Image: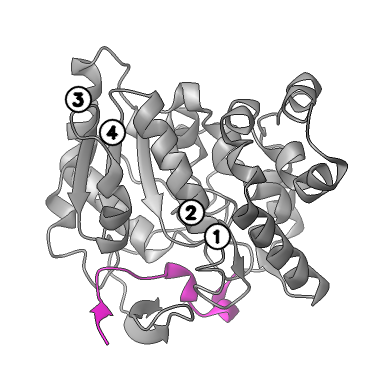
Amino acid sequence: MSKRKDTLDDSSQDSKKQKTTTPKQAFLTSWIKQPSSASGETVTKVTGKMSEEMKKLLKTELETMDGEWLKALVNEMQKPYFAELKKFLATEKSNNKKIFPPETQIYSWSKFTPPSAVKVVILGQDPYHNDGQAHGLCFSVPPNVQPPPSLINIYKGLQNDIPTFQIPKHGYLVNWAKSGVLLLNTVLTVRAHEALSHNGKGWERFTDAIIQYLNEKKTGLVFMLWGGHAIKKGKVINKTRHLVLEAVHPSPLSVHRGFLDCRHWSKANKYLKEHGKEEIEWNCLVENKDVPTTNNVSIKADVEFKAISVIQQDSTSVVEVCDK
């Protein structure tokens, strides 16, 4: 039995330490602008020859996915494995299992970053599994939720790379997504408080199709692959058409094996500029007008961690999980 020490799930932090949303916090987040989903015209086009049964099965996708991504992935979503995945999720729901992220946010990555806008791809694993953390973008958490350990380390690595980068007081990465950074998890859902619980159900094949679509249909993209899991998933990427940057995972268990000095962000911008594309303004988080920064959210420079092991249900591998 082998251990993958370069991966970890930040969301295993003790759920009792999650702050309860106050009326003030609810007000602050209520006016955050959300992107629109596929238009009625787009939905009509992609469902033209689709059976009523399939339309019902893909209700969430048709109602919440970005139109460009919907057109790109509609054939993939009609394959048998995806139908089995949707039936599994329906069974979870009928058994009163709480699923993260909320159903309307499973495809947030698509709505904030349509295919035509993608310049950089960052791959995560499965969503955070504690209350209030997951909202459909890898490594990101909603406003007024404490930034998880791996995200804190991403901020530190970025500041080492670009000294003018200001570490924000939040972990809400929507402005990166709006700037062309596709924040995609390998698995798009998880059962509450059970890390890796939706692994091996079909999401991996679906996100493989997303990566392959970008690999084949686009040129000059930057793929940031952090940790053995992401690196393995990115083996299909054509390195003559795209820039592939690899490093250890930013988790506390592996971050000091080179992540903090990987300088992926400046390398990405250099490559984008050389290929005639606008660079990513990585510093856009602090000036994020959509996210109020409050004094009750802070980033701790030094955090103590203890590691616990969680056995992945669909394999014999052991994944190290961080328990703050």
Vertical arrangement, residue 202 with respect to residue 95, above or below: above
Between the C-alphas of marks 4 and 2, the distance is 21 Å
| Sequence-first tag of 4 and 3 | 4
Q: Residue at x 20, y 60 (%)?
A: 248
* Residue 9 drawn in magenta: yes
Say what secondary structure mark 2 lies in. Answer: helix
For the N terminus, the quadrant is bottom left
The residue at which mark 1 appears reads as 202
Amino acid, disc 2:
Arg
Which label was assigned to residue 271? 3
Mark 4 vs mark 2: give the one in front: 2
- Find out whether the residues at labels 2 and 3 contact each other: C-beta distance under 8 Å: no
| Sequence-first tag of 4 and 2 | 2
Amino acid, disc 4:
Val
Between the C-alphas of marks 2 and 3, the distance is 29 Å
* x then y, percent, for residue 110: 57, 37
- Find out whether the residues at labels 2 and 1 contact each other: C-beta distance under 8 Å: yes
- Find out whether the residues at labels 1 and 3 contact each other: C-beta distance under 8 Å: no
Left or right: where 286 falls relative to 246: right
Which label was assigned to residue 222? 4
| Sequence-first tag of 1 and 3 | 1
| Sequence-first tag of 4 and 1 | 1
Left or right: where 149 falls relative to 146: left
The residue at which mark 2 appears reads as 205
Within 10 angstroms of label 2, few (less than 14), some, or many (20 or more) residues?
some
- Find out whether the residues at labels 4 and 3 contact each other: C-beta distance under 8 Å: yes
